[in-house]
Image: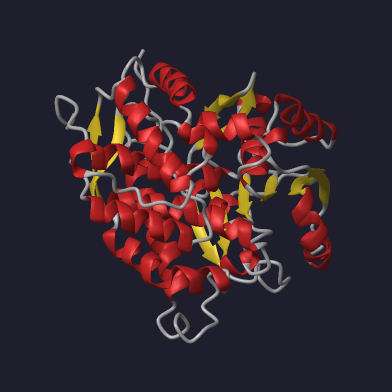
Amino acid sequence: MTATRQVNYEIVESSHILDPANPDLAALPQGSEGGHGRRLVVIDEGVDGILGEKIRGYFRERNTPMDYLVLPGGDEHKTLDQMVRVASRLNAIGTDRVGTPPIAFGGGVVQDVVGMAASLYRRGIPYVRVPTTLLGQIDGSVSAKNGVNFEGCRNRLGTFAPPPRTLTDRTLIATLPKRQISSGMGEMLKMALIKDAVLFELLEQYGPALLAENLQDTGPLTGEEQLGREAMHRAITGMAEELQKNLWETDLRRIVDYGHTFSPAVEMKALPELLHGEAVAMGCNFGAVLSARRNLLPYEQLERIVRTTRNLGLEPSHPLFGDPDFLNKALVDTVRHRDSHQYIALPKEIGATTFVDDVTAEEITEAAAVMVRILNGQSPVVDAADRGTYGAGPVE
């Protein structure tokens, strides 16, 4: 048997979606007809404290029957138990196969937990994503993946199941804590480094202003040109371009995995200390150090990357990135995930990427020493005689 399945899903940019006059939140995906039951809205606990009444008021005003479930956020709650809670509530209210798709309202943890529950319930039902974090809007909004952490491993259980509709509303992140904005900008930095030098220059020049304004373009430096909107659009578009040509990850050489070779292990080990985007930004800096020591990335550009990371309110390093034994163990697990290959994406200049498959334990040890320097506020540039020359060359 040979079968193909066409998958279409939309990412809709809307504004003020909690205004009852805006029909986008209540609309069913892709014009489908509604069922006869109630729809479930799953809300992140933190979001519920800020927007919960507005969300409920929106559906009351539109006379739309809904049921609500509030879940805690944070990666420590990204578990099978939470996923089962969602599935149990879907069952309790009598969710239809197609016509009553649940809505996931919150950050990446809630999005993933609801997405996985929807992908398993009745072997797969449609759902709607409404990401309320910057990270969720520029990264998770495009992804087809969902999952939960398992036995200390990030996203070890999961499925590929994109929702037919995702709604992004920049006004939802206007009141987020600055740390949440910085975390999202960690993924934005990743996209800049792997394929968009213009985005990097925008972050380099205007990063502090974008952070101060939660990307709402309310200040004199950003308002006229709408630089926050441009930064978000570039990050979302860049991610969509990369995922569309390899949505199911049949090719394990993915430039969007830059910064994600070592950071998942660091993030899980440090829970709940680090947010996802914070760990990714550190992983991006570690990759830049590896690249510079291979004479792929100019050291001047490495310094720019470290400086820009800090200007986005992010730390470029962490004690675990200075622990070579831990990092080498992390690489072993990543190699298993990439079918016995490293396939490490490295920047060969800002905005351009290559792959290597021969990083050694010695390289990791020496790069970890540089990360300790960075952690201590020192320059990543070491004496020229100490720069390594490694590897058989890129894997193109």
In the shown orientation, is residue 351 left or right of residue 284?
left
Relative to the observer, which residue lies in front, 161 or 201? 201
Q: Residue 209, can we see it? A: yes
Q: Residue at x 37, y 71 (%)?
A: 205
Give the vertical position of 328 relative to 197 (above or below).
above
Relative to the observer, which residue lies in front, 219 or 136? 219
User: x%, y% of residue 37?
Assistant: 79, 43
In the shown orientation, is residue 299 left or right of residue 202?
left
Q: Quadrant of the N terminus?
A: top left
Q: How is the image coloured?
A: secondary structure
User: x%, y% of residue 328?
Assistant: 42, 21
Q: Quadrant of residue 69?
A: top right
Q: Residue 263, can we see it? A: no
Relative to the observer, which residue lies in front, 135 or 115? 135
Q: Quadrant of residue 82?
A: top right
User: x%, y% of residue 276?
Assistant: 56, 43
Q: Residue at x 64, y 71 (%)?
A: 16
Q: Residue furthest left?
A: 392
User: x%, y% of residue 361?
Assistant: 34, 20
Give the vertical position of 185 relative to 279 (above or below).
below
Q: Quadrant of the C terminus?
A: top left
Give the vertical position of 314 relative to 155 (above or below).
below
Q: Quadrant of residue 234?
A: bottom left
